[in-house]
């Protein structure tokens, strides 16, 4: 494909804006349709980014012949069904994390992707952040092996608000959303499947109906281990912080920043063409479409992560 890739983006919230900003830096790609819940706000965003078509219904965008691909930044509960709708409409699809909030739905997306041969990718951004790419390259070169990962995913979220401080129409989830980042990254960086997983969770919030605290242990087939702590109760620095403890070094990744175990900064500015993980993720999606290949973070590659999340959910229900 040498022509411009025309994209429909669904979900003009905090993450949708991040994709729109990233796409502006990518040649040969144009967002031609914007879908979101509130028409007036969607029109405002569309006007800012020069997007000609606006709708509140994804089906309207899928009906546009000029649309080649769709990026879904919609509520978690819609992800699998909307991914299936995109593939059935003959559109390549990138869905923001998580692919699904129940394993069967993720398996259905993969089955349809295999049937259609279209590009179907999930936004596991950590695979693309330059800080994590640096560690991955060290592993690929045989210069570093992970012995243990210690990860903290912390937010202060007592009400249902998004990253822009706006009310959400859906409820976030520590296991199916936030743990998915680390479960996938751990197996990806180790180059080894997860063979053991344990989880415990704190009390269920009376209004939100979800656990606000969770602890997860993982073990890969190659012997590496991972400890993941997650909380919506943390009143302090927010985000996810990764400590890689290896045989030759220790690395601490904070989004796009990387330091060694002594807190000495490591320059990752030359690792890729951008320091923006979302932009790099989108570049991979469009490159895979142009080159007719499977993308990094394809549905097929990340489904094992959701199999582990399903196992953990069964444990938590039983407990």
Image (cartoon, rainbow, N blue to C red):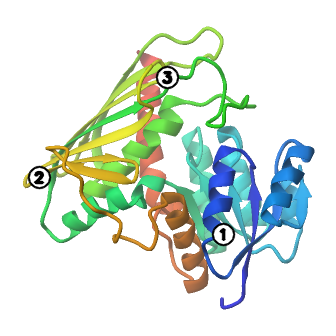
In this view, the mark in front (1 or 3): 1
Q: In this view, does 104 lie to the left or right of 148?
A: right
Q: Residue 232 carries which label?
A: 3
Nearest to the observer: residue 218 or residue 237 = 237
Give how far apart the Cα atoms at labels 1 and 3 are: 33 Å
Discs 1, 2 touching: Cβ within 8 Å: no
Residue 149 picture quarter: top left
Q: Where is residue 103 in the image (x, y as percent from the top left)?
A: 54, 42
Nearest to the observer: residue 182 or residue 260 = 260
Residue 51 picture quarter: bottom right
Q: In this view, does 132 lie to the left or right of 181?
A: left
Q: Name the residue under label 2.
A: 249
Give the quarter of the figure containing the N terminus: bottom right
Residue at the extreme bottom: 2
For label 3, the crowd category at 10 Å Cα-Cα, with few meaning under 14, some 14 to 19 and many 20 or more, is: many
Q: Is residue 230 left or right of residue 32?
A: left
Give how far apart the Cα atoms at labels 1 and 2 are: 37 Å
């Amino acid at each position: 494909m040498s022509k411009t890739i025309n994209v429909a983006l669904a979900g003009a919230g905090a993450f949708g804006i991040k994709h729109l900003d990233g796409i502006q830096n990518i040649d040969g790609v144009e967002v031609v349709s914007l879908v979101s819940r509130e028409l007036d706000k969607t029109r405002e965003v569309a006007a800012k980014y020069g997007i000609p078509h606006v709708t509140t219904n994804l089906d309207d965008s899928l009906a546009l012949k000029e649309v080649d691909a769709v990026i879904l930044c919609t509520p978690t509960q819609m992800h699998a069904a909307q991914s299936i709708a995109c593939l059935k409409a003959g559109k390549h699809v990138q869905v923001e994390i998580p692919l699904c909030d129940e394993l069967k739905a993720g398996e259905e997306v993969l089955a349809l992707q295999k049937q259609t041969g279209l590009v179907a990718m999930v936004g596991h951004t950590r695979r693309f952040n330059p800080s994590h790419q640096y560690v991955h390259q060290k592993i690929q070169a045989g210069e570093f092996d992970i012995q243990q990962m210690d990860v903290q995913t912390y937010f202060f979220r007592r009400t249902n608000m998004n990253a822009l401080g706006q009310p959400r129409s859906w409820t976030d989830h520590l296991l199916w959303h936030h743990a998915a980042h680390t479960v996938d990254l751990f197996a990806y960086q180790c180059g080894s499947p997860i063979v053991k997983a344990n989880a415990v969770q704190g009390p269920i919030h009376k209004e939100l109906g979800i656990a606000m605290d969770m602890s997860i242990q993982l073990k890969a087939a190659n012997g590496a281990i991972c400890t993941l702590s997650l909380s919506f109760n943390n009143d302090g620095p927010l985000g996810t912080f990764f400590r890689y403890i290896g045989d030759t070094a220790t690395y601490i990744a904070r989004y796009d920043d990387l330091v060694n175990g002594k807190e000495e900064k490591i320059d990752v500015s030359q690792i890729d063409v951008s320091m923006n993980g979302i932009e790099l993720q989108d570049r991979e999606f469009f490159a895979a479409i142009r080159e007719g290949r499977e993308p990094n973070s394809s549905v097929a590659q990340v489904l094992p992560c959701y199999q582990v999340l399903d196992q953990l959910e069964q444990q938590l229900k039983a407990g």
